[in-house]
Image (cartoon, helix red, strand yellow):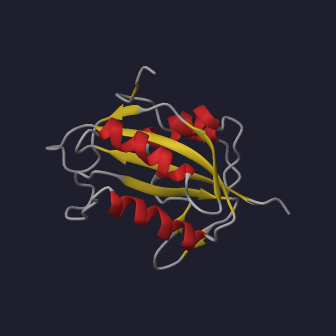
Amino acid sequence: MTEFPFRCFIGLGSNLEDPQAQVCRAFDELAELPQCRLVRRSSLYRSAPVGPQDQPDFINAVAELQTALEPEALLDQLQAIERAHQRVRKIHWGPRTLDLDLLLYADRTINTERLTVPHPFMYERGFVLWPLVEIAPQLSLPDGSTLAQRLDQCPMGTLERMPL
């Protein structure tokens, strides 16, 4: 068994307090998580908000991690990073300093009170799928579909890849 046997993908998003810096700092913090290794990080993407439209655009990205943590232990670590960024949950799909979503955990399908994997809305969201295909173009999804098939159903729309 390898040191970090599980391949995971994390969605990152922010639209408050210098969102680009929030996401870049979160990449660094993901790289420092215990029992984890940051493998890849996508470019940053600008997207219109989902939900209430009276909020700033989001900066989004996706990170690939290798981990030895079990799913809920990883979720605990992600939520600790969100808290360190002063994440406040007031409005569903509202503005936030940092949002970290566990998108995929190995090839597992998980449905617990705290965690649903694959993330329940990831297949509908260009700001998840386009950064994901950037770093893992050959990825097979737990339901047997491919990213290419999912992208056909989720056009880029107004999503904008930001310059490096």
Q: Nearer the viewer, residue 47 or 40?
A: 40
Which residue reaches farthest right?
1
Which residue reaches farthest top?
163
Instruction: Classify the position of the N terminus by image quarter.
Output: bottom right
For image coordinates 45% across by 54% down, the residue present is 121
Residue 114 at x, y percent in the picture: 46, 75
Residue 153 at x, y percent in the picture: 51, 38
**Relative to 18, 151 lies left or right:** right
**Relative to 151, 18 lies left or right:** left
Q: Is residue 131 above or below residue 64?
A: above
Residue 67 at x, y percent in the picture: 67, 60
For image coordinates 67% across by 65% down, the residue present is 108
For image coordinates 65% across by 38% down, the residue present is 136
Q: Is residue 160 above or below residue 101?
A: above
**Relative to 90, 132 lies left or right:** right
Residue 42 at x, y percent in the picture: 53, 35
Q: Nearer the viewer, residue 160 or 76?
A: 76
Q: How many marks?
A: 0
